Image (cartoon, rainbow, N blue to C red):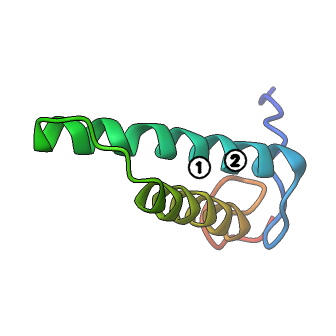
Amino acid sequence: MEPNYDFSKLWTLNWKDVGKGILTASGTAVIIPIVQSLSIGSLVFDPISMGYAALAAGISYLLKQLATGSDNKLLTKN
């Protein structure tokens, strides 16, 4: 018996996908200034770059989920 992972169908999103997209965007917005600060050597807080990175991460996650079928394989209908 295989476990039920409750994946959304191809070209659809469920609320779990949207929540994970928001979580991905939030995590990216937190990680960006940390990485930039470590590479430069001083504290960097650039809300514009944080916003762009978070938006790109959230959108890319949602696009990936849209193109993934219920069997969790890219571009396969189930």
Foreground residue, 23 or 75? Answer: 23
Instruction: Describe residue 50's horizontal placement relative to residue 6 as left or right.
Output: left
**Are circles 2 and 1 on residues that touch, CB within 8 Å?**
yes
Between the residue at mark 2 and the residue at mark 1, the CA separation in whole angstroms equals 5 Å
**Residue drawn 83% across the image and 33% down it:** 4
Within 10 Å of disc 2 (Cα), the crowding (few <14, some 14-19, many 20+) is: some
Foreground residue, 25 or 40? Answer: 40
Q: Residue 46 at what x, y percent from top left?
A: 39, 53
Give the residue type at disc 2.
Ile
Which type of secondary structure does the marked residue at label 2 adopt? Answer: helix
Instruction: Describe residue 2's horizontal placement relative to residue 57 as left or right.
Output: right
Quarter of the image with the N terminus in it: top right
The residue singled out by tag 2 in the image is: 22
Q: Residue 24 at what x, y percent from top left?
A: 58, 45
Which type of secondary structure does the marked residue at label 1 adopt? Answer: helix
* Quarter residue 23 falls in: top right
Does residue 5 sit above or below 59 in this rendering? above
Instruction: Describe residue 41's horizontal placement relative to residue 75 as left or right.
Output: left
**Residue drawn 79% across the image and 51% down it:** 18
Mark number for residue 55?
A: none
**Residue drawn 53% across the image and 59% down it:** 51
Does residue 26 sit above or below 55 in this rendering? above
Quarter of the image with the C terminus in it: bottom right
Q: Residue 72 at what x, y percent from top left?
A: 67, 53
Give the residue type at disc 1.
Ala
* Quarter residue 8 falls in: bottom right
Within 10 Å of disc 1 (Cα), the crowding (few <14, some 14-19, many 20+) is: many
Foreground residue, 65 or 20? Answer: 20
Instruction: Describe residue 14's horizontal placement relative to residue 73 as left or right.
Output: right
Foreground residue, 2 or 20? Answer: 20
**Residue drawn 46% across the image and 62% down it:** 48
Mark number for residue 25?
A: 1
